[in-house]
Image (cartoon, helix red, strand yellow):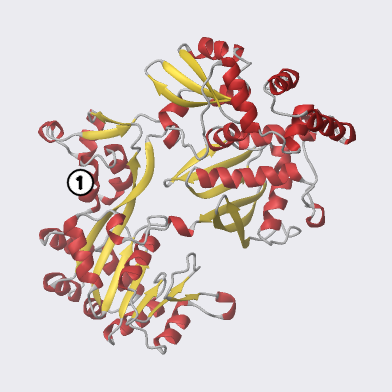
């Protein structure tokens, strides 16, 4: 909302803040400026007076308090109190809320009709404080302005006819310059929003009649406001140029990377493009090195499991397998383990596909099938480098498995991943690959299965009583429910109204002691090995998930979603 610059100028004169010479110089600046600006703007441009001083002057005139919102983080419950459309349209931001009184900051205290309108729209008392426009814009950008507003601006720049278009020719590489601000800003806005929301990847999918954009947040895909269908080709071309892909090739899959800055942080995006019936589908995996958790105790291990992990990490040789589906946090766990045992006295080499995060002090090798640099070929080579510890990104075939076992039997500690549903199932999987059972029994020391549970949002967590469906599916008795307190998030701006914010691991650690080793030698089925492991004290994924629900870290709803297929 624009302020009355003539009124502001009169206040400046009355306060004696400028001299006649300064006013004359500013007027000359206005006369020479190619675009029409006010005398007040000229005084600010010539640094005769600052925006902060004008705000202070206006606040004194109207008897309002001036607040400094630089780097101020608005509490989520306060953000919730003012809908985004009102904040943006009225150019105000909420700063505090006490009972039925909401305090909002504005840059123009003369617009008191805004406060009256907010009182009517919100149904509560509203008071005003004054802040600079720059500070208000910062809070609006951080809490309210999303890609929806970027799209609105884009469509405005394209003109009213844009809405009637069915197709727009894609922007060619040599045409995609800084002058193409609308598309560039929209693409950047989509990526920045995803990063701010804590998304792990961005899915941009062409449908028959619309263009769909989804963010994977805490392991669950969430649809967001998407650009119109007619911008599909433009967005695809822009992303392929950023990822250094061939924009003229639309018939085959392509992979690339994007590097960009979001505020003070540099992030990488791993980009995959694949042709579909209605255009090219693009998925971007967000790789933020600062977000990876390299502190083992913070991964979510309880004390009893932490004892087992420490015992495994202190072993001189053998194989330690981490199992679970894609996106269950296996790589993060392995990185945390390696970081813990990474000392000057140990040589650690990893073979990965791809190397997503670079770890200081560790030699990391990238698999490249185009030059026959497979896991097996890389593993043979690195064993000649005399490492103490080897990490294999994934055991995918019998050749890699046999080399890993030979490495373990010759004095190396080997970490790797395998795609199985539970820990004991990894043994059967190796045997099914073609590895002899006695070799598996001799080399494998421990197996850990894991999943990720969504955490209850701390800002909106509240007690709740499990319903009958949850009790039935989890086999919980009324006595059990009565003696435990469970938490659930009601949904707020901090968690995107989902009730969840962040994730924590659940674990199932199977140590191959003498009893289990004997069963492996005899090639017993997975269920027999699993029952023996449970008798020896192994907590199942369901057990660990329930412990975290009991502690209020997650919900029973999440326990069911994540572990239902892991129980008989």
Residue drawn at point x = 24 percent, y = 56 percent:
301
Residue 543 coordinates in the image, percent (x, y): 20, 49
Residue 459 coordinates in the image, percent (x, y): 35, 34
Residue drawn at point x = 44 percent, y = 27 percent:
78
Q: Secondary structure at mark 1?
A: helix
In terms of depth relative to the viewer, which is nearer, 85 or 374? 85
Q: How many marks?
A: 1
Residue 431 coordinates in the image, percent (x, y): 30, 73
In terms of depth relative to the viewer, which is nearer, 47 or 535? 47
Residue 75 coordinates in the image, percent (x, y): 42, 32
* Residue 556 picture quarter: top left
Query: Could you tell me which quadrant the N terminus lies in?
Result: top right
* Image-based side of 456 in relation to 119, left or right: left
Mark 1 = which residue? Answer: 547
Q: Is residue 133 visible?
A: no
* Residue 558 picture quarter: top left
Position of 120 relative to 548 (above/below): above
Residue drawn at point x = 66 percent, y = 38 percent:
227
Position of 348 relative to 487 (above/below): below
In terms of depth relative to the viewer, which is nearer, 197 or 447? 197
* Image-based side of 127 in relation to 163, left or right: left
* Image-based side of 112 in relation to 426, left or right: right
Position of 514 relative to 550 (above/below): below
Q: Is residue 18 visible?
A: yes
Residue drawn at point x = 69 percent, y = 62 percent:
244
Q: Residues within 10 Å of mark 1 (few under 14, many from 20)?
A: some
Position of 524 relative to 156 (above/below): below
* Residue 496 picture quarter: top left
């Amino acid at each position: 909302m624009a302020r009355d610059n003539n009124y502001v100028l009169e206040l400046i004169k009355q306060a004696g803040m400028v001299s006649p010479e300064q006013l004359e110089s500013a007027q000359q600046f206005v006369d020479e400026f190619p675009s029409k600006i006010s005398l007040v703007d000229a005084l600010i441009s010539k640094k005769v007076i600052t925006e902060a001083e004008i705000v202070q002057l206006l606040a004194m005139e109207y008897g309002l308090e001036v607040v400094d919102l630089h780097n101020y983080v608005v509490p989520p419950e306060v953000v919730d109190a003012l809908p985004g459309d009102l904040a943006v349209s009225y150019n105000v931001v909420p700063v505090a809320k006490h009972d039925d009184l909401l305090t909002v900051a504005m840059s123009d205290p003369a617009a008191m009709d805004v406060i009256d309108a907010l009182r009517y729209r919100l149904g509560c008392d509203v008071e005003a404080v004054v802040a600079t426009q720059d500070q208000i814009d910062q809070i609006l950008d951080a809490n309210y302005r999303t890609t929806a507003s970027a799209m609105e601006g884009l469509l405005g720049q394209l003109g009213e006819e844009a809405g009637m278009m069915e197709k727009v020719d894609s922007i060619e590489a040599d045409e995609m310059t800084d002058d193409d601000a609308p598309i560039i800003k929209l693409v950047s806005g989509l990526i920045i929003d995803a990063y701010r929301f804590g998304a792990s990847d961005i899915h941009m999918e062409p449908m028959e009649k619309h263009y769909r954009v989804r963010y994977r947040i805490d392991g669950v895909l969430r649809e967001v406001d998407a650009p119109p269908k007619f911008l599909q080709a433009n967005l695809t071309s822009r992303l392929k140029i950023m990822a250094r892909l061939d924009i003229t090739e639309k018939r085959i899959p392509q992979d690339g990377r994007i590097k960009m800055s979001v505020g003070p942080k540099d992030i990488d995006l791993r980009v995959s493009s694949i042709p579909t019936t209605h255009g090219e589908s693009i998925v971007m995996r967000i790789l933020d090195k600062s977000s990876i958790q390299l502190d083992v105790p913070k991964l979510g291990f309880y004390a009893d499991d932490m004892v087992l992990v420490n015992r495994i990490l202190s072993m001189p040789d053998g194989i330690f397998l981490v199992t679970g589906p894609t996106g269950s946090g296996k790589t993060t766990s392995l990185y945390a383990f390696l970081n813990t045992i990474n000392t000057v006295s140990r040589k650690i080499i990893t073979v990965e596909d791809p190397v997503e995060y670079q770890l200081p002090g560790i030699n990391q090798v990238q698999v490249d099938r185009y030059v026959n640099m497979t896991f097996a070929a890389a593993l043979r080579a690195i064993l000649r480098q005399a490492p103490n510890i080897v990490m294999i990104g994934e055991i995918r075939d019998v050749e890699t498995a046999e080399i890993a076992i030979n490495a373990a039997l010759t004095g190396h500690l080997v970490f790797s991943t395998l795609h199985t549903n539970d820990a004991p199932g990894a043994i059967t999987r190796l045997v099914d690959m073609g590895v002899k059972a006695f070799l598996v029994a001799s080399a494998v020391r421990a197996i850990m299965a894991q999943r990720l549970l969504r955490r209850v949002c701390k800002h909106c967590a509240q007690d709740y009583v499990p319903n009958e469906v949850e009790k039935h599916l989890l086999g919980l008795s009324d006595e059990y429910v009565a003696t435990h307190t469970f938490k659930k998030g009601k949904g707020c701006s901090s968690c995107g109204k989902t009730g969840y914010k962040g994730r924590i691991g659940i674990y199932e650690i199977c140590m191959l002691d003498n009893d289990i080793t004997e069963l492996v030698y005899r090639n017993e089925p997975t269920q027999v090995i699993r029952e023996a492991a449970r008798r020896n004290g192994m907590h199942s994924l369901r057990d660990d998930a329930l412990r975290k629900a009991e502690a209020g870290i997650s919900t029973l709803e999440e326990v069911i979603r994540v572990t239902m297929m892991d129980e008989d």
